[in-house]
Image (tube, grey):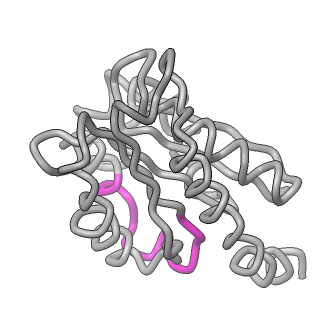
């Protein structure tokens, strides 16, 4: 399988700022590493995701998306912040994964919220979740508030600079994994 970056946005709404942020970050990772990208959101997994107790409970299309997530060379995950945390359905998706499924996989953490008071969701919620999976979360997380968007797209100069810094860290992390995969 060729190397690729896959984004998953923890939103059911379309359009969504979370999806726009994940799309942009995934596209920049793909451009930097010269690999293809794909982005999905929770709406792509519905209505089956909410009723699934195991991955085997998912019908073929949502299961294929999950398999794509699991096979990704790099994951870009993002969630809208509700009441200080990620959404329940976002967490449920990862509850279905085998605990070893993401071990060593480079993961860029992103989140969106209405204001700056939710920015720590990356450190207090997302990083521990992916730490459980022993994923290789990148040091820089990307949080965007409503002020970072114009016409539904990420536009804030500070946000774009943070994305560039985070994406710039990936080649060092991905190269050894890609070489091992090729061997």
Front position in the image: 64 or 108: 108
Front position in the image: 180 or 125: 125
The answer to whether residue 181 is above or below residue 87 is below
Q: What predominant SS class does the magenta segment belong to?
A: loop
Find residue 27 and report its horizontal and vertical position in percent: 71, 42
The region drawn magenta spans 94-107
Magenta span contains residue 104? yes
The answer to whether residue 31 is above or below residue 149 is below
Find residue 114 and report its horizontal and vertical position in percent: 24, 34
The answer to whether residue 166 is above or below residue 144 is below
Residue 126 in which image quadrant: bottom left
Residue 95 in which image quadrant: bottom left
Residue 121 in which image quadrant: bottom left
Indicate left or right for 142 with 130 as reference.
Answer: right
Find residue 148 and report its horizontal and vertical position in percent: 44, 36
Residue 45 at least partly seen? yes
Quarter of the image where the N terminus is located: bottom right
Q: What residue is at 42 percent from the left and 15 percent from the top?
A: 14
Q: What residue is at 13 percent from the left and 49 percent from the top?
A: 84
Indicate left or right for 51 with 111 as reference.
Answer: left
Q: What residue is at 71 percent from the left and 67 percent from the top?
A: 168
Indicate left or right for 146 with 183 as reference.
Answer: left
């Amino acid at each position: 399988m060729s190397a690729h970056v896959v984004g998953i946005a923890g939103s059911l709404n379309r359009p969504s700022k979370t999806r726009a942020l994940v799309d942009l970050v995934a596209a920049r990772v793909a451009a930097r590493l010269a690999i293809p990208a794909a982005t999905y959101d929770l709406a792509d997994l519905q209505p089956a995701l909410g009723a699934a107790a195991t991955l085997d409970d998912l019908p073929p299309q949502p299961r294929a998306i999950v398999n794509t997530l699991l096979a990704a060379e790099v994951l870009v995950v993002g969630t809208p912040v509700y009441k200080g945390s990620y959404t329940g359905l976002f967490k449920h998706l990862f509850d279905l994964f085998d605990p070893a499924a993401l071990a060593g996989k480079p993961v860029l953490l992103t989140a969106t919220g209405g204001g700056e008071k939710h920015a720590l969701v990356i450190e207090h919620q997302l990083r521990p979740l992916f730490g459980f999976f022993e994923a290789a979360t990148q040091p820089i997380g990307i949080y965007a508030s409503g002020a970072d968007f114009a016409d539904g797209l990420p536009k804030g100069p500070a946000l774009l600079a943070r994305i560039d810094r985070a994406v710039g860290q990936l080649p060092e992390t991905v190269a050894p994994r890609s070489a091992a995969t090729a061997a």
